[in-house]
Amino acid sequence: MAVSRDTAAPAARVRSALADVRGAAARSRGFGTIRPRVTRLIQDFPGLALSLRRLKLDALAANQELVHLAVERMRANGMQVFLARTNQEALDYIRSVLSAPGLVVKSKSNMGKELHLAEALVGHGLEVIETDLGDRINQLAGTPGGHVLAPAASKDREEIRELFARELGRDLSSDPEVLVGAARESLRSFLERADYGVTGINALAAETGTVCLVENEGNIRAATVLPRVHVAVGGIHKIVRSLEDAVLVIRGASVFGAGQNLGNYVTCISGPGDGESGPEEMHVVLVDAGRSDAIARGYAEAFTCINCGSCLSFCPVYGQIGDAFGHRRVGGIGCLQTALLEGDEAGELDGASLCIKCGKCRTVCPVQLDTPGLLIRLQQERSRPNRGWIFPVMAATVADRRLLRVMGRFVRAYQKTGLQHFVRGSRVLLPLGLEPAEALLPDRPSPTFVPPLSLAAQGGERARVAFFRGCLADELLGGINRDTLDVLVVNGCRVSVPREQVCCGAIHMHAGDANKARELARRNIDAFRGDEIVVTNSGGCGYLLKLYGELLADDPAYARLARDFACRVRDLSEFLMALGLRDMAGIDPPVRVTYQDSCHLALGQGITEQPRHVLRSIPGVEFVEMESREACCGSGGLWGLKYPELSRRLRRIKLEDATMIGAPIMATGNPGCYLHLQGGEIEVMHIAELLAAGYRGGGVGAGWGGGCGLSRRRVRAGRAS
Amino acid sequence: MTGSTVARDWSRHLAGWSRPTPDLVTAAEAMFKAQGWHVLRTANLDEARAHLDSLIAPGASVVVHESRPWESVGFEAVLRARGVRVERFGFPGAEGDRASLTAASVGVTGATAVVAETGTVLLAADDAYGQLISNLPYMHVVVAPTFKVVATLDDGLWLARRYAERVFGRAVPRYLGGISGPSRTGDIEFVMVPGMHGPGRVHLVLLDVEPGPEMLGDLPADLLYP
């Protein structure tokens, strides 16, 4: 597949970032510290994210009015306020304020980064010193720093030691305390003689005209009061109503971003100093630069972001490639904002397509910002069709049962004839760009399995369910569907498998083809008329099936039907835990099993306990919890085909996690993860396969010989009846 | 009420002031310690003086921001008698030399509110000296009465607003600082190191005293002044 011009940059960045072993190790250490801290602390603030989300959405809905009020109140406080329509206007104004030559002490500022403010001021003949330690480290190294809270997250202490030793002209130890002492001494000398202090804005309270800032180091406090002139610069989306609201924003940033009860220093300034104790002049530069347009276009949510950096700390992609996930702005939210403010091309260049859409960010966000959802929505609104040929072929195939069957036959022939061994050995697909797609195929051919239209319950009927077969899994992993039906039947379910069902549409949604997804959704809703529970063994399918109500909300003929349908959808483990599993013989010899959370199941549907409960219920399964270093296994559907090296890196990490806990078997509830993870040193099994083995008795078996053998009998029975 | 229940209570309520319960003060002490403050709570001014004596070395240079409790302890005279250089800022009629702020080794301030849920000293002022004095020297000492302990940040903001309204005739103070422990950075491998730009050591001296009779509207003046 030819790499088109505007994706070349992110792909090239990914390759060099993946080669930076030292940076990855530094991030891994850092995030290994901050992730558990944040995860633990946010449990103590159950309502905070929802309150903040509402507060910010409310402030953005009234943004025009609040901008007006804030400007008026700040001027009444004696501040000089400039409302910049564009980045250029903001830069021009700041340059006019800093007209005399001098020394600028600058603190961390996202807007400053967007404006390339430091470079612009240096070009203007000023000396600019970054005073945040992480930023200073990057300034000395000449590297950009992307992570909001930890700009030097990709540098280790040895590298930092070298930088400060060079700057101070003396040898230092690499002990962090020594390095911090050296940085204090050096930066203090700049702060004390600075002419200008330039800071960002964390939140701006409109009612009192108050600029609010938060930090841990104390450089912001110094930069706001030591120099003669203080310039604070921020986007108009930072405006909230009251001082109390602003402090709540700071609270959220502290808890979610740093895992801290409250940032060390909160600074709220409601006027310039008297010229004696504080600065003579205070300037506030509020930048619109497309924000009010984006809000008017219905994308206010993208600007509820309070820049705490939590999403970056938890993002599996950022974890692996760091600042290469971004350019002007960093991470999924950064790319989203770039796309909204500067256009799709710019967003793409920043790396919007690098978002794997696992949804981890949303669960750790102080405003529950749905970055993946907004990126998908933006993609759907694009007029540009998706490039390349893999997607259209794949999309057409999964949407058509007959084409799927043909593909399935082809794949099985490919596997059985030994062609697969030849292809994998010779790597002939490499120049064609098809190797990542081929690698997803199972190592062994899956048994041909065409599910019957209906199956009778065994041992007394307890429930009536309809089974959603899925598409790719149906053809490539038929054994899983067979085992799923077996498990349902032995648990007393009468199962129907509607013939007219089609692909759920997730692949089309992901690729931005919402219309095709809606068409498939309508066909599925028609196929599943009735009131049975709809059971799926695919976390990915289940996620979208449960969203049909929202997908078809504007379709007058289907809105209600879609909502009703969505309410009936259950994941296999969710359904079985609620139903209660019947006793089983168990697996013998016993096996040690760990479980891999599928993003669509765990983060998308909140199903984490049910699969574990089901696995623990199987006699002979010793369930062990692995420590997942990254949220996602790196499959991501088409994403994995676009970024194969990154996808393989995440896969390897997940397999190593299982190895570390000593589990030879990793269970999963999603065929997408299954296809991606299989073929390595860890045996990957669907929960349905382990359950079927449990009901069958004996060992787990090697791959597809399994099943309880029930459905084959039921097939005949079903057809006879 | 324990420290942890205070920490979990982030709910916002803008009620008026009421005297802190003994449990709240105890919870505040625990949270301040958890945030890295060294805390002494005492009703005995001799003990407070002895404690300050142990903190402030004979060779120190001290800068002080307006603080009624600091005045009540009367330690400044002791320091001066000992030849320690003490400069006062923000007190009525007493302005120190701004240049000496950067050379000082100890900064002393009062507090507008002592916030239990976060271990935060809120410092409201119309001048920027409080910000400088609590930031530039390596040691920061806060002297505050226990009746300034409040449960939540919003309670603290409430007091800061009343102070600004009744003393400066403004809705909010020009400078409002929240300090929740020593300056720190985690920028090197996420290892927390104290004393990056601001003080590496922070002390809170909580005095178990009663507010004086002077009132500002319906609130004791000692409650509003730092």
Image (spheres, rainbow, N blue to C red):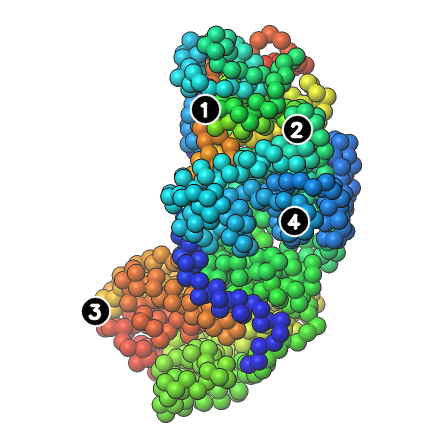
Residue under disc 1 on the same chain as residue under disc 4 = no
The circle drawn on residue A278 is 2
Q: Specify the amino acid type for callout 2.
A: Gly
Q: Which residue is mark 3?
A: A589
Q: Secondary structure at mark 4?
A: helix
Q: Secondary structure at mark 1?
A: strand
Cα–Cα gap, marks 1 and 4: 40 Å
**Badge 4 or badge 3: first in the primary sequence:** 4
Residue under disc 3 on the same chain as residue under disc 1 = no
* Residue nearest the viewer, comparing A527 with A276: A276
Q: Specify the amino acid type for callout 3.
A: Pro
Which callout, 2 or 4, points to the residue nearer the camera? 4
Which callout, 4 or 3, points to the residue nearer the camera? 4
Is disc 4 surrounded by few (<14), some (14 to 19) or many (20+) residues within 10 Å?
A: some
Cα–Cα gap, marks 2 and 3: 75 Å
Q: Specify the amino acid type for callout 4.
A: Val
Q: Is residue A252 visible?
A: no
**Badge 2 or badge 3: first in the primary sequence:** 2
Is disc 2 surrounded by few (<14), some (14 to 19) or many (20+) residues within 10 Å?
A: many
Is disc 3 surrounded by few (<14), some (14 to 19) or many (20+) residues within 10 Å?
A: few
Which quadrant of the rendered structure holds the N terminus of chain A?
bottom right
Residue drawn where x is 57% and y is 24% of the image = B101
> Which quadrant would residue A4 be assigned to in this image?
bottom right
Looking at the picture, how far across and down is residue B71, in whole percent?
Answer: 54, 11
Q: Which residue is mark 4?
A: A122
